[in-house]
Amino acid sequence: MVKVPDTKKYVGFYLVEGMWAGAKPDYSKFNDGYWLTPEYTKLMEEIVVSLKDDDREVFIARDGLIAYRDKELDKAVEPGKDFPRIETYAEILNALFLVMVSVITEDSQIKYHTYFEISHHDFVPVTYEGSDWKGAGVPTKSMASQYLNKRFLSYIPHNMTNSLDIYLDSPPRPVVSEDTLKKAVELFFGVVTDKRSARLFGRTNKALAEYASTAFSDTILITWLQIETYLYDLLKGYMRKEGSSRFNADRRKRLSKESTVSEAIEILEVAGQLDTDLYKRLCEVRRIRNKIVHEDYSADHGEAAKAVELTQMILRIKSGKAIALYTGLSWSGF
């Protein structure tokens, strides 16, 4: 009886500016013709980093493809069909994107990679049968996809195939070491452990993508949702423990569920759950958020950066790990 190879499906993405994983490719692979696609896709098959964690797996290919799978994904990715549970994988991939960009930037000390929100237009479905590569899709619609397709689908003069990264990418893509890539994937496994943490990290990436595009008011609105969730979790935890000695059960339940965020901040500050500095910062960002919502106010980059700093603190508290978030506006290059 012939054994049918197991089918494994991945969903992946590229950093907007691109990267070479581990080392630059051997350009001699591209000397056989004018069309780039057949030769270039070999680099998608060349796996540089592959790490597993329980039911999850991440691999990174030479051309910079970052691919993810879990035990549910084989059922979800079907060529030519709608992607079910799209919001779940969007949050997971955005969380992975956030961690990758943060670690790469921190290790290299170069602000090269830009935070970018991964949508279903950016997903790259990849299929294996056993250990054999069976192909990958190419996204077609988003800004990141257009950048990717420039590399995949361009018509390249034969005499220029020895300088592909210069011809196709300006500035040239950096090389990211295997150690840095492994560090990023291991950190992702460590901090994104369930749907709730995936949502927190994924939406933080969305907020930073808005910041990178100078949509500072949107940055504050998105980060404030995560800040509110943290405050209500903190309030509920306090009411279950210390609050039980100060309030009866009905009072604790009402305060935990019915308090406005303003009331939650005041209760937590009086109870000693927020120090003076954090209390002031929360009140300041909340005030800016309310002006955006109620007064059509346009926030600036400094105000948005304060909201991101609060979110960075929440990421550290929730995950137990320091996550570097970069809000400096600078030209993405060397």
Image (spheres, helix red, strand yellow):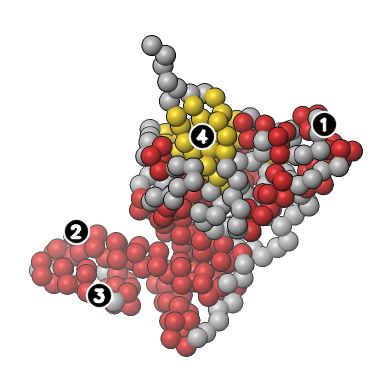
For marks 4 and 3, give the one nearer the viewer.
4
Q: Quadrant of residue 214?
A: bottom right
Earlier-in-chain disc, 1 versus 4? 1
Depicted 270 relative to depicted 155: above or below: below
Residue 197: horizontal and vertical position, in percent? 38, 52
Earlier-in-chain disc, 2 versus 1? 1
Name which residue type carries label 3. Answer: Ser
Q: Is residue 244 left or right of residue 7?
A: left
For marks 2 and 4, give the one nearer the viewer.
4
Q: Which residue is mark 4?
A: 127
The answer to whether residue 22 shows anywhere in this view is no
Report the Cα–Cα distance between label 3 and label 1. Answer: 67 Å
Earlier-in-chain disc, 3 versus 1? 1
For marks 3 and 2, give the one nearer the viewer.
3
Q: Which mark is residue 241?
A: 2
Q: Which residue is mark 1?
A: 31
Q: Which residue is mark 3?
A: 259
For marks 2 and 1, give the one nearer the viewer.
1
Which residue shows up at 55% across the image and 62% down it?
Answer: 208
Asked whether the residues under the numbered discs 2 and 1 touch, taking CB atoms below 8 Å apart as contact, a structural biologist would say no
Name which residue type carries label 1. Answer: Asn
Using the image as rendered, state which of residue 271 and residue 178 is in the foreground.
178
Asked whether the residues under the numbered discs 1 and 4 touch, taking CB atoms below 8 Å apart as contact, a structural biologist would say no
